[in-house]
């Protein structure tokens, strides 16, 4: 049994991977984890019944086989379950079935298929070749949308990560990732949105051009077009029924404004005043959320904050370069990248907001500290006196921190456009404000306010001699400072509980019991909010 702790929005939860008997019901059920709260709802959104035999038949035809010799669940992620199929002609294929949490499944599937084709044939980035697919459940005997794709060579980076390779082993992987990411900049699109086959978008969008005038490549203009965004921020829950602007957009600012206005429209139609719960899910009225989002919109519309320049051009980017989505050569071969998988929700967005350090390489906390400058991260004081098992932990943390630094060092030396992006201080504020604006009601009003306050304070330094579009009254700033102090208390208490829940990762029942015990000891008044891990609390993968 393997326990994995992972972040779910602002909440930490625990998954336990279990070996289950292969039967059709286990194909339909979510079998890759457990939740400490909201488990019933989480499992329900991930239960997908489909016709297994029909799926085998379609896959056989796609690979030119007579029969499927094995149908094995590979695992499940946030949005999909994946199966490995083998056939009587010695070929293999991967089948992916989306969860019901995805909306709209038709557009998301159609866009991902087109994106993988574009990535593989136009940008020459190794990605799975699609063998067969259906985007509508009622159009196939399978009874569910699906994608059948080739199995990429190699193993996931996660498989080699858990062997704790040293920094020198990881160097080829970091270089390959940067080389592949640089190819994204060769295709500069004329609009912001998701990529589709030309015949899958409306006639008016078919008449739009694919690329901007300064794009290095023109290949694929006859096959692909930019269409409406399939980002979850525009489709979660009741948002799918709203009459809102989902693109495509001509400017990055128009996209940012659309995110905030989508949230405002949802709040007007569906938000209900609620009792105070915690500093994230506040008791502020819908009107307060809408007012703060108006401030965000004015900020997004300011040409200084989001200029219409080459650094904000629309480029395609992988949505989640995590350990499981980067394929590398198996050990003992060098750790070169063999492919990138899971292109769901990829879209053409502003280069400034997409080109960040991949999740797989981010080092944010541990027993060593990231340092500035080109030198490797130093070992902490007292390292030589540590027991051997603790030395191994420190050395692994240092290797990961070194790779984070190496990635950024290579950008500064070899990729001038990305280096220029990284030196723009406002990029972080725009990115944070965009993420928060799309989830203001659910849990992010605190971040909307915090970012706008910071921008107002820093504006004279960021843009000397210009008028700040954010004009917050003194009493508003005082209210923010009071709430910020409460937030800090709440975060400290939550972190303490989080650490205690990670002390016994091998037994779900014991961890759940410990969670309930900590809930009884939780002081709502002292900590500034209710216990974070309880049924009914916000979960980023449940619709809201």
Image (cartoon, rainbow, N blue to C red):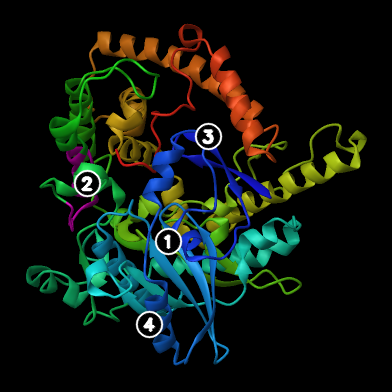
Residue of label 4: 58
| Residue 464 appears in the figure | no
**Vertical placement of 322 versus 435: above or below?**
below
**CA–CA distance in space, label 4 to label 2:** 44 Å
Viewer-side label of 1, 3: 3
Secondary structure state at the residue bearing disc 2? helix
How far is disc 4 from disc 3 in space, using C-alphas?
38 Å
* Relative vertical location of residue 488 with respect to residue 425 in this rendering, above or below: above
Say left or right for 175 vs 303.
right
Circle 1 — which element? loop
Q: Are marks 1 and 3 in contact (CB under 8 Å)?
A: no
Label 1 environment density (alpha carbons within 10 Å; few <14, some 14–19, many ≥20): many
Q: Is residue 517 left or right of residue 417?
A: right
Whole-number angstrom distance, CA of label 1 to CA of label 3: 30 Å
Q: Pointer 1: what residue? A: 318
Q: Which mark is residue 253?
A: 2
- Which comes sooner in the sequence, label 3 or label 2? 3
């Amino acid at each position: 049994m393997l326990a994995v702790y992972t972040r779910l929005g602002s909440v930490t939860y625990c998954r336990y991977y279990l070996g289950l008997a292969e039967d059709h019901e286990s194909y339909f059920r979510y079998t890759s984890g457990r939740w400490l709260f909201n488990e019933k709802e989480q499992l329900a959104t991930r239960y997908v019944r489909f016709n297994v035999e029909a799926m085998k038949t379609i896959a056989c035809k796609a690979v030119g086989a007579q029969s499927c010799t094995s149908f094995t669940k590979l695992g499940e992620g946030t949005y999909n379950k994946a199966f490995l199929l083998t056939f009587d002609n010695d070929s293999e294929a991967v089948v992916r079935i989306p969860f019901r949490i995805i909306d709209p499944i038709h557009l998301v599937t159609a866009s991902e298929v087109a994106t993988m084709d574009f990535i593989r044939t136009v940008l020459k980035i190794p990605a799975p070749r699609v063998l067969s697919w259906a985007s509508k459940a009622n159009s196939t005997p399978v009874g569910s949308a699906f994608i059948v794709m080739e199995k990429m060579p190699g193993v996931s980076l996660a498989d080699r990560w858990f062997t704790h390779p040293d920094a020198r082993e990881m160097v080829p992987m970091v270089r390959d990732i940067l080389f592949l990411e640089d190819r994204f900049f060769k295709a500069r699109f004329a609009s912001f949105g998701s990529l589709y086959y030309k015949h899958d978008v409306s006639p008016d969008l078919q008449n739009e051009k694919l690329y901007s005038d300064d794009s290095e490549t023109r290949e694929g203009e006859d096959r692909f077009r930019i269409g409406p965004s399939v980002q979850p921020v525009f489709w979660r829950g009741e948002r799918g029924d709203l009459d809102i602007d989902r693109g495509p957009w001509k400017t990055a600012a128009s996209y940012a404004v659309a995110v905030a206005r989508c949230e405002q429209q949802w709040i007007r139609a569906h938000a209900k005043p609620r009792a105070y719960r915690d500093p994230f899910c506040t008791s502020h009225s819908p009107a307060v959320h809408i007012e703060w989002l108006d401030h965000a919109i004015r900020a997004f519309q300011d040409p200084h904050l989001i200029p219409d320049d080459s650094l904000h051009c629309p480029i395609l980017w992988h949505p989640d370069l995590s350990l499981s989505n980067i394929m590398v050569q198996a050990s003992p071969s060098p750790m070169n990248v063999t492919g990138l998988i899971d292109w769901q929700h990829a879209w053409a967005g502003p280069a400034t907001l997409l080109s960040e350090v991949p999740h797989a390489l981010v080092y944010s906390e541990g027993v060593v500290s990231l340092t500035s400058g080109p030198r490797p991260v130093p070992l902490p004081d007292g390292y030589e006196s540590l027991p051997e098992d603790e030395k191994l932990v420190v050395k692994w943390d240092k290797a990961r921190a070194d790779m984070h630094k190496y990635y950024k060092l290579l950008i500064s030396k070899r990729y001038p456009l990305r280096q220029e992006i990284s030196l723009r201080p406002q990029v972080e504020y725009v990115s944070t404000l965009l993420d928060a604006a799309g989830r203001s009601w659910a849990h992010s009003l605190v971040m909307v306010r915090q970012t706008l306050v910071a921008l107002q304070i820093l504006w004279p330094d960021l843009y000397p001699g210009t008028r700040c579009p954010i004009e917050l009254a003194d009493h508003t700033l005082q209210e923010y400072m009071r709430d910020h102090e409460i937030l800090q208390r709440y975060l400290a208490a939550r972190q303490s509980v989080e650490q205690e829940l990670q002390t016994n990762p091998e037994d779900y029942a014991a961890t759940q019991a410990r969670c309930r015990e900590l809930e009884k000891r939780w002081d709502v008044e002292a900590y500034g909010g209710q216990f974070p891990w309880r049924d009914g609390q916000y979960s980023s993968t449940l619709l809201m």
